[in-house]
Amino acid sequence: MEYGVIVFLIVLLILALIIFNAKRKNRVKQEDFPEEWTRMLHEKVDFYAQLSTVEKLRFEKNITQFLKDVSITGIEVSITDLDKLYVASSAVIPLFGFPFWRYRNLNEVLLYKDTFNEEFATEEANRNVLGMVGSGAMNRMMILSKPALHQGFENKSNKSNVGIHEFVHLLDKADGETDGIPDVLLEKQYLIPWIKRMHTEIEDLKNENSDINPYGAKNEAEFLSVVSEYFFKQPELLEKKHPELFVILEKMYKQDLA
């Protein structure tokens, strides 16, 4: 047998082994991820349901990695598998365009039984906080109202998702400042267009000439989180109502939601 034929056969064998191992790894990943979790993601998380088969596997892998990295603790509430999936999905969605990124500035997510106030109390008056990224003694922690977390995924018609909102704050904070300019996400050529568009949209909000959540007018950081919720919950509507903003967010998150 000629030397060239032998080399060709060896190459074919190596390729066959690579393909076999790749398929085997995918099967292992599917078996490791509970079927019930896959069902819940299909039913409850629209972002996941619209992904291709390959992307769904990557989403599941990211869910698994997040749950290894970050603890989820209930404060006067029990934690269910669905709670874990909602928290992890909130984290995975904004970073899905960055396959190898992880949250290095978070150790634990606390789920509260209800809304809370700035002192984290759930029984006092003026409890209007749905979520918060911790600071000081609460650094590297996130607090979410469990009912609000569920509402963000289960109300399909609105533009709000408190889980995504707070994880976008974490991404914004990753460069050292929570200022609505996420340097870790935004390529330099889009920096000025983003700042200009953000201020234009905030001005429209202040003049009550926008369908974006008015809370986004509070400051640049809240605007980023509010429009990111809108982007991931209702991308078609955002593209229709705010096409320039939509294009910049697509480039920021490296995701084609259109």
Image (spheres, rainbow, N blue to C red):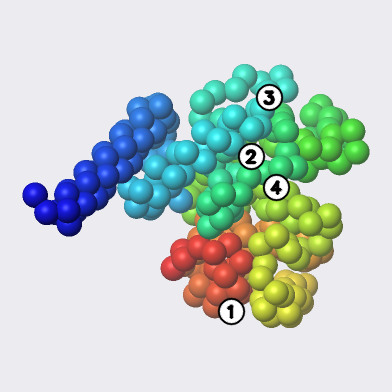
N-term-proximal mark, 4 vs 2: 2
Q: Which residue sits at x=73%, y=49%?
A: 170
Q: How far from the left and from the top, in percent, is residue 54?
A: 35, 48
User: Which numbered circle lies on residue 208?
Assistant: none
Query: In the drawing, does residue 192 fall left or right of residue 16?
Result: right
N-term-proximal mark, 1 vs 2: 2
| CA neighbours of label 2 inside 10 A, class few (<14), some (14 to 19), many (20+) | many
Q: How far from the left and from the top, in percent, is residue 53?
A: 33, 47
Q: CA distance from mark 4 to mark 2?
A: 12 Å
Q: CA distance from mark 1 to mark 3?
A: 39 Å
* Amino acid type, callout 3: Thr
N-term-proximal mark, 4 vs 1: 4
The answer to which quarter of the image holds residue 90 is: top right
* Amino acid type, callout 2: Ala
Residue identified by numbered label 4: 166
User: Which numbered circle lies on residue 73?
Assistant: 3
Q: How far from the left and from the top, in percent, is residue 47?
A: 46, 51
Q: Which residue sits at x=46%, y=64%?
A: 257
Give 221 or 181, whichever is nearer the viewer.
181
User: Which numbered circle lies on residue 148?
Assistant: 2
Residue identified by numbered label 1: 244
Secondary structure of the residue carrying tag 3 is: strand
Q: How far from the left and from the top, in percent, is residue 104?
A: 71, 42
Q: CA distance from mark 4 to mark 1?
A: 24 Å
N-term-proximal mark, 4 vs 3: 3
Secondary structure of the residue carrying tag 4 is: helix
The answer to which quarter of the image holds residue 21 is: top left
* Amino acid type, callout 4: Glu
| Residue 200 seen from this side | no
